[in-house]
């Protein structure tokens, strides 16, 4: 779904919710702080990690939908 676009499911439509494993970020933050990386760069790195995990969850969701 494109960024900024809101999706509201219609009544009667099926909704699939996929929950992933918790993302370990503490070690990432500690290593970045040890390297004296700025907070903005840490945030960018965290968003990259989260985005990667969201894409993998999207793939799982698509597999579930394609197998129905």
Image: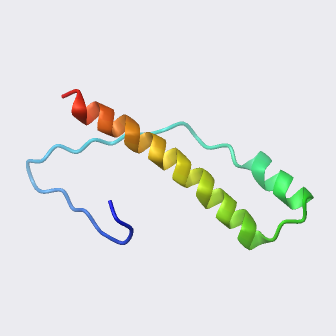
Q: Percent x, y for residue 3?
A: 39, 68
11 lies above or below 15? below
Q: Percent x, y for residue 54?
A: 47, 48
Please name the residue shown 76% across and 70% down the image: 39
Residue 22: image quadrant is top right
Residue 35: image quadrant is bottom right
Please name the residue shown 54% across and 48% down the image: 52
29 lies above or below 60? below
Q: Which residue is at the far top?
A: 67
Q: How many marks?
A: 0
Q: Percent x, y for residue 49?
A: 61, 51
Colour treatment of the image:
rainbow
From the viewer's perspective, tell me whether residue 17 is left or right of residue 35: left
Q: Which residue is at the far left?
A: 12
Please name the residue shown 47% across and 41% down the image: 56
Q: Percent x, y for residue 42?
A: 73, 64
From the viewer's perspective, tell me whether residue 21 is left or right of residue 17: right
12 lies above or below 63? below
52 lies above or below 21? below
From the viewer's perspective, tell me whether residue 36 is left or right of residue 45: right
From the viewer's perspective, tell me whether residue 18 is left or right of residue 54: left
Quadrant holding the C terminus: top left
Please name the residue shown 60% across and 56% down the image: 48
Quadrant holding the N terminus: bottom left
Q: Nearer the viewer, residue 61 or 12?
A: 61
């Amino acid at each position: 779904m494109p960024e900024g676009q809101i999706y509201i499911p219609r009544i009667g439509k099926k909704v699939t919710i996929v929950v992933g494993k918790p993302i370990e970020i503490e070690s990432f933050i500690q290593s970045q702080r040890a390297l004296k990386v700025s907070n903005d760069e840490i945030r960018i790195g965290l968003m990259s990690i989260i985005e990667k995990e969201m894409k993998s969850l999207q793939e799982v969701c698509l597999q579930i939908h394609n197998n129905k």
